[in-house]
Image: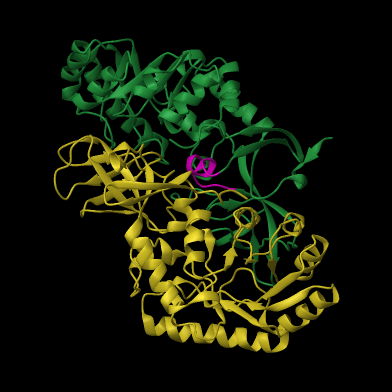
Chain colours: A yellow, B green
């Protein structure tokens, strides 16, 4: 009854089991236990999160309420952080889990309190123009939160403008700049937690008490450009459906790939020409035939996974398991 | 019990009912009945397809087997064309529908015959380097298909390299070039159908017997750049979750938007700075407050819709209906 990748309908997400295992173990060695708060937004899969928990990480980071709900339902709710601002927190207050939510303004603090959430982190802008209060407002907001009866566990501040920079020295210097802002805010806020970081700064950010990395488990071609010890575990299996003398076409298109980081790559050195809704057109490095299967390597993991219903764990050509991508949606 | 857009969880796809109606009626006036074979890949929604059927179009175009299955199940299978090559056609042969599939090679012809499909179109490359045989091979392939017992209904050839060109005269001239190739192939192939075209060439392509337009119903900012009579019906409703003096952030990110055509726009003149997994950061044209709702206009409709579970049909702020995006996946 063993299935192979040739039995899969394409396009299909496939995860190389040994590479995933390598990535999880490498990270758990570098940041054991609670030093890592794995971010589930990159994989949106509770089965994969369970592997991270088995490696010692019992606290998790989420980006959406749906992710929080799914993690709680999967029994992975020991310490869940929603590292994002929400205005209707009632769905969070109802969860059978320890829930902490990021806040960066009075309305988000009021929403947390009104929704029955008990614990918060003050989200601080450390250089990425996204959510997060100015560092100098963090202490005041912590006071507002405490006056609303909320437990303030500390601060978070994501150096998202730094994690993808190719030069390691620049990445290190800018991480320090960001974290000095966060430490200053933390002095005013108090609490045990200083939460920050990502896959690109997991070993450079020595100021945070916990790192929110997520992409390290599956990786993508953008992070593969950096000097990281993690390898690409995920690809999209596709079937060649048309081939001419100059180009070939496989059934992996815009609805199977996050495209904000640009075109994917293809294993075997095939050159991607362009991607359409349901197709990738490429120049073959060596001749391909209609019916051949290829592996397409996404440029950005998070919005790629979010298109798929499941990921297939494989060892070479053998399919070991199918894991639902059960944290999709909002 | 009437719901408003303020009751919706965000991000949420919303469709302005009157604009959708305008677009469907405008197209049905220009290309009545079988002159249009609406492409469902742009909206992936059988409820919307039913509106197109009510406007007189009973034959449809699909891009995936899942779309074919869903349309058949929804009772919209009077004449379904899978305008794409497939190698496992068994799921098509089982459908309770009239099924025609595109073929461009011996293996795809054999797959159609083996899968129990009875009718095909010869797919011809008319200038877009994607699927489609060279025009000079079309006649030979039609012979192969007939020798396999398949009914060859005619040809298709998509001028996808032309549909988005901004200058109308260039678009017209290049459509003619493409269609002369398709007509030449049709002379060798025979059959009643010459299927081609898209939203950008719906009124310029006077050679095809039927036009495969899909985007016209919902539209996007890329097609809005052209001189078309269709208006943007679809947007992504988002909530402002953070606001500073310089920028604001709403909860509509890379997992709610197809990004291959670049950044979305935002109604009200707000300037998009960048998009992250779950966020759009923008410079407000006028002050916004946390909790405000904004409408984000996608640059490319097809990969945007494919991220969402449902679309909400609205009239201004009132929510009239929720339509499942039931043709997602493969």
The percent position of residue A143, horizontal first and vertical second, equals 80, 80
Left or right: A174 with respect to B239?
Answer: left
The magenta span reads B297-307
- State whether residue B208 appears in this view: no
Q: B203 or A200: which is nearer to us? A: A200
> Is residue A138 shown above or below B259?
below
Quadrant of image for the N terminus of chain A: top left
* Residue at left offset 55%, top offset 78%: A210
Q: Would you say B22 lies left or right of B145 here?
A: right
Residue A174: x and y in percent read: 48, 83
Residue drawn at 41 percent across, 49 percent down: A257
Camera-side residue of A282 and A75: A75
Which residue shows up at 73% across the image and 63% down it? B287
In this image, B243 relative to B214: left or right? right
Residue B178 on the magenta span: no
| Residue at screen point 21% across, 42% down | A247
Where's residue A237, x and y in %? 32, 45
- Say if B204 sits above or below A293 in the image: above
Can residue A282 be seen by looking at this rendering?
yes
Q: Is residue B306 magenta?
A: yes
Task: Tell me if residue B97 comes above or below residue B27 in the rendering.
Answer: above
Image location (x, y in percent) of residue A281: 28, 43
How many numbered discs? Answer: 0
**Which quadrant holds residue B178?**
top left
Determine whether A78 is above or below A126 in the image: above
């Amino acid at each position: 009854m063993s299935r192979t990748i040739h039995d899969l309908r394409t396009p299909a997400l496939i995860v190389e089991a040994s590479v995933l295992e390598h990535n999880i173990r490498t990270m758990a060695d570098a940041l054991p236990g609670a030093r890592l708060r794995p971010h589930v937004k990159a994989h949106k899969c509770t089965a994969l999160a369970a592997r991270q928990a088995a490696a010692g990480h019992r606290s998790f980071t989420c980006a959406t309420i749906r992710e929080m709900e799914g993690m709680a339902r999967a029994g992975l709710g020991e310490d869940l952080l929603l590292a994002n601002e929400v205005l209707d927190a009632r769905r969070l207050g109802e969860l059978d889990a320890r829930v902490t939510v990021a806040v960066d303004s009075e309305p988000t603090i009021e929403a947390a309190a009104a929704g029955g959430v008990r614990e918060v982190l003050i989200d601080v802008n450390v250089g990425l123009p996204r959510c997060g209060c100015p560092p100098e407002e963090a202490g005041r907001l912590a006071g507002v939160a405490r006056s609303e009866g909320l437990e303030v566990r500390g601060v978070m501040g994501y150096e998202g403008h730094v994690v993808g920079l190719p030069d390691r020295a620049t990445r290190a210097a800018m991480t320090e700049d960001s974290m000095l802002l966060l430490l200053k805010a933390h002095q005013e806020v108090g609490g045990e937690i200083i939460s920050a970081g990502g896959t690109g700064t997991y070993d450079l950010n020595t100021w945070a008490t916990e790192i929110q990395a997520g992409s390290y488990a599956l990786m993508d071609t953008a992070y593969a450009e950096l000097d990281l010890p993690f390898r690409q575990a995920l690809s999209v299996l596709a079937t060649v459906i048309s081939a001419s003398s100059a180009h070939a076409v496989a059934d992996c298109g815009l609805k199977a790939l996050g495209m904000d980081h640009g075109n994917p790559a293809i294993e075997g050195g095939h050159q991607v020409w362009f991607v359409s809704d349901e197709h990738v057109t490429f120049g073959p490095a060596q001749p391909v035939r209609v019916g051949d299967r290829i592996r397409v390597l996404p440029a950005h993991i998070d919005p790629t996974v979010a298109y798929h219903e499941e990921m297939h764990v494989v060892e070479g050509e053998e399919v070991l398991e199918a894991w639902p991508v059960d944290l999709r949606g909002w």
